[in-house]
Amino acid sequence: MNVREFEAAAKAVLDPVHYDYFASGAQDELTMRANEEAFRRLALVPRILRGHQPPGLGRTVLGSQASMPIMIAPTAFHRLAHPDGERASVRAAAEAGVIMIAAMLATVAIEDMAAEARKVADDPALWFQLYLQPDLGFTEAIVRRAEAAGCAALVVTVDSPALGRNERGDRNDFHDLPPGIRCENLRETGGSVRGVVLSPEISWRHLDWLRGVTTLPIVLKGVLHPADAELALRHGIDAIIVSNHGGRQLDGTPPAIDRLPVLADAVGGELPLLVDGGIRRGTDVVKALALGATAAAIGRPVLWGLAAGGQDGVARVLALLRNELLNALTLCGCDSTESVPRDLVLRGAM
Ligand code: FNR
C-alpha cells in the first residue's frame, strides 16, 4: 500500500545485519529521523477550481528524459537486499522511465547494469555516482568505464571526506561484504569496500581536474551550505543534489528539505537542484518541487522494494509513488510538475 509497508516487508525477509546496514544512520540518527519529520512539518495549501487537465509528470533533467520527477539515489550493495541486486533495480527503473544513479559501490558492474537497462528500454537514463579518489589514474579509469557504458551524468558525492560513524554497523561488526559479493566497479583493485578512499584532501582542484577530463554533466551530491552552491556555480558544476546522505554521514546536519529554499536562493535558477532524504510520499515530492527542486530522489524506499520483491518490488515502489504524486498534484490544483508554486507550502502550521 505504501513505502512504510515495504520497509516492514523488507525487514521480515532481510538478514538483520543487512537490514541495519540499509536502515541505519550515523551515531544518534538525529539527522536520519529529522529528514522524514521535516516533511511532516510542512503543510500544503491547495488551490481550487483550476479547470486543468490531469497533470503530466514528465521531466527532463540534464538532458535525461524522465517519466516523473522522482529519481533513484545511489545506494551501495544491492545484492545484500536481493540476489539479482542492481540488475533488478536498474531494470525496474528503466522500465518505469526513471533516472537511476548507479553507485560506484554497486555489486553489479556498471557495464552490466547498462546492458540490463537496455533490455527493457531503448534509451535508459543511467547516471554514475563517484567518490573522487586521490589516485586520479584510478578515478579517470572508472570515469571512462561509466562513459563507455553510456552513463549520462557523473554524480560526485562530496559529503564524504571520511566515513560517517555508524554504531549499528559497528555493533554488528559489519565492515565488508560476504563471500561471493563484491564491488564490481572496483574489481581491478580486488572489489573490496576497503579499496575506496574517502579523503579530506579532495578539493575543488579535483573537481576542476574532473571538469577537464570529461564532457559529461557533473552533479555535486551532498551540498548543504549556500556558499558551496555559489562555488559550484563558479566551478562549472551542472547540478546540485541537496542531501545529507540520508543521515548517514555527519549526524546533526539539518534536514535536506529545509536547506532546499536556502540553496535555491543561492543559485538563483542558474542550475537545477535535486534533493534527497526522507522522501516517502507523493506529497513529499510535491513539497520538494514547490521549494525549488527539479526532481527528488529516493534511497531506502528502493532498497525496501528490492528486498521485498526484487525487480517487481522496485517497480511497485516506483508505481505507488507515481500514483501518489499524481494524486497529490491534482489535489493541489497543479497541472504540471513545472508549475508548483512556492506558496503551496506553509511552514509552522503542523
Ligand atoms: C546510501 N547513500 C549513498 N550515497 C552515495 O553517494 N553513495 C553511496 O554509495 C551511498 N550508499 C548508500 C547506502 C545506503 C544503504 C543508503 C540508505 C544510502 C545515500 C543515498 O544516495 C541518499 O542520499 C539517501 O539514501 C537519501 O535518503 P533516503 O531516501 O534513504 O531517506
Image (tube, rainbow, N blue to C red):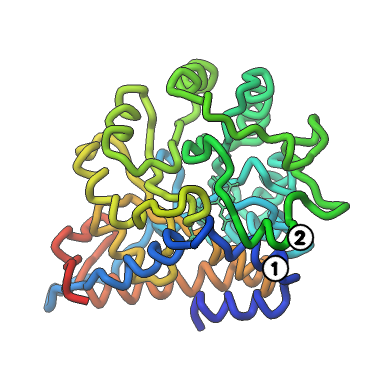
Q: Secondary structure at mark 1?
A: helix
47 vs 212: above or below: below
Residue 155 can be seen, yes or no: no
Kind of residue indicated by mark 2? Asp
Q: Secondary structure at mark 2?
A: loop
Give the Cα distance between marks 1 and 2. 7 Å
Callout 1: CB less than 8 Å from ligand 1: no
Residue at image location 27% in from the left, 33% down from the top:
227
Residue at image location 29% in from the left, 50% down from the top:
259
State the image coordinates of residue 315 (x, y, percent, origin top left). Answer: 59, 68
Residue at image location 58% in from the left, 75% down from the top:
7
- Work out whether residue 318 or residue 134 is closer to the camera in this orientation and state it: 134
Residue at image location 31% in from the left, 27% down from the top:
231
User: In the drawing, does residue 130 fall left or right of residue 337?
Assistant: right
Residue 8 can be seen, yes or no: yes
State the image coordinates of residue 155 (x, y, percent, origin top left). Answer: 50, 38
Q: Which residue is mark 1?
A: 310
Q: Which mark is residue 84?
A: 2
Residue farthest toward the bottom in the current orientation of the protein:
1
Kind of residue indicated by mark 1? Gly
User: In the drawing, does residue 34 fall left or right of residue 125?
Assistant: left
Q: Quadrant of the C terminus?
A: bottom left
Q: Around disc 2, counting alpha carbons within 10 Å, would you say few (fewer than 14), some (14 to 19), or many (20 or more)?
A: some
State the image coordinates of residue 326 (x, y, percent, origin top left). Answer: 35, 71
| Residue 335 lies in quadrant | bottom left
| Residue 193 lies in quadrant | top right
Q: Are marks 1 and 2 in contact (CB under 8 Å)?
A: yes
User: In the drawing, does residue 307 fall left or right of residue 68?
Assistant: right
340 vs 1: above or below: above
